[in-house]
Image (spheres, rainbow, N blue to C red):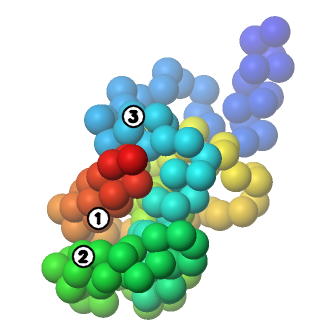
């Protein structure tokens, strides 16, 4: 049994160690529904990548995203080549947590490089996004 477990972990790129102690933000992410996670990624993409927010929130979400983007100024610290908001999630969660969080997507969907992004900006981004999608 241990052999199968190790083989599975190896196949999905997880080092066979105990999971890291999650921080409160990661726990909050895990409590979101699939729809809320999708919305959170869309909001992060709108804030940092300038993509439009589709869906019911429309104009209110777009105005909120513009205000957060104005405060965070992602153009000053985010590589313009970044195209996927999951890379921001990965950088915020950290490599140890991301190795498990990324199991929510296809194995080859994203292999983010853990860029040296400012942790204070990522923390503010995800706190704001999680608040927005959790407020009900």
* Quarter of the image where one finds residue 21: top left
SS assignment at label 3: helix
Q: Residue at x 70, y 32 (%)?
A: 9
Q: In the rendered image of this protein, does residue 51 appear above or below residue 54?
A: below
Residue shown at 30% from the left, 89% from the top: 75
Q: CA distance from mark 2 to mark 1?
A: 8 Å
> Which residue is at the front of the view, 44 or 105?
44
What residue is disc 2 on? Answer: 68
Mark 2 vs mark 1, foreground winner is 2
Could you say where residue 102 lies in the image, as x and y percent from the top left? 61, 49
Looking at the image, is mark 2 or mark 1 earlier in the sequence? 2
Q: Residue 68: name its quadrant.
A: bottom left
Q: Please state the horizontal and vertical placement of residue 98, each as a whole percent of the image.
A: 51, 47
Dot 3 corresponds to which residue?
27
Label pair 2/1, CB-CB below 8 angstroms: yes
Q: Nearer the viewer, residue 35 or 5?
A: 35
Q: How many residues crowd around disc 3 within 10 Å: few (fewer than 14), some, or many (20 or more)?
A: few
Can you give x and y, in whole percent of width and height, for residue 125 in the image? 29, 64
For disc 1, the marked residue is 125
Residue drawn at x 61%, y 47% as measured from the top left: 34
Gap in angstroms between the C-alphas marked 2 and 3: 23 Å
Provide residue 77's location: percent of width, then percent of height. Answer: 27, 82
Residue found at x 36% / y 76% = 60
**Numbered disc in front, either 2 or 3:** 2
Q: Is 95 on the left-hand or right-hand side of 105?
A: left
Q: Is residue 121 above or below residue 62?
A: above
**Cα gap from disc 1 to disc 3, whole angstroms:** 16 Å
Task: Say which quarter of the image contains residue 10.
Answer: top right
Badge 2 element: helix
Contact between labelled residues 3 and 1, with CB atoms less than 8 Å apart: no
For marks 2 and 3 on the same chain, the one whose residue lies earlier in the sequence:
3
């Amino acid at each position: 049994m241990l052999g199968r477990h190790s083989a599975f972990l190896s196949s999905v790129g997880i080092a066979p160690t105990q999971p890291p102690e999650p921080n409160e933000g990661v726990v909050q992410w895990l409590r979101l529904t699939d729809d809320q996670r999708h919305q959170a990624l869309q909001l992060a993409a709108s804030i940092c990548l300038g993509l439009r927010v589709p869906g019911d929130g429309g104009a209110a979400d777009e105005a909120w995203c513009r205000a957060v983007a104005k405060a965070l100024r992602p153009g000053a610290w985010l590589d313009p080549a970044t195209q996927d908001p999951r890379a921001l999630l990965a950088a915020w969660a950290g490599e140890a947590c991301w190795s498990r969080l990324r199991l929510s997507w296809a194995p080859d969907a994203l292999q983010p490089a853990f860029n040296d992004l400012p942790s204070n900006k990522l923390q503010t981004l995800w706190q704001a996004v999680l608040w927005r999608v959790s407020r009900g």
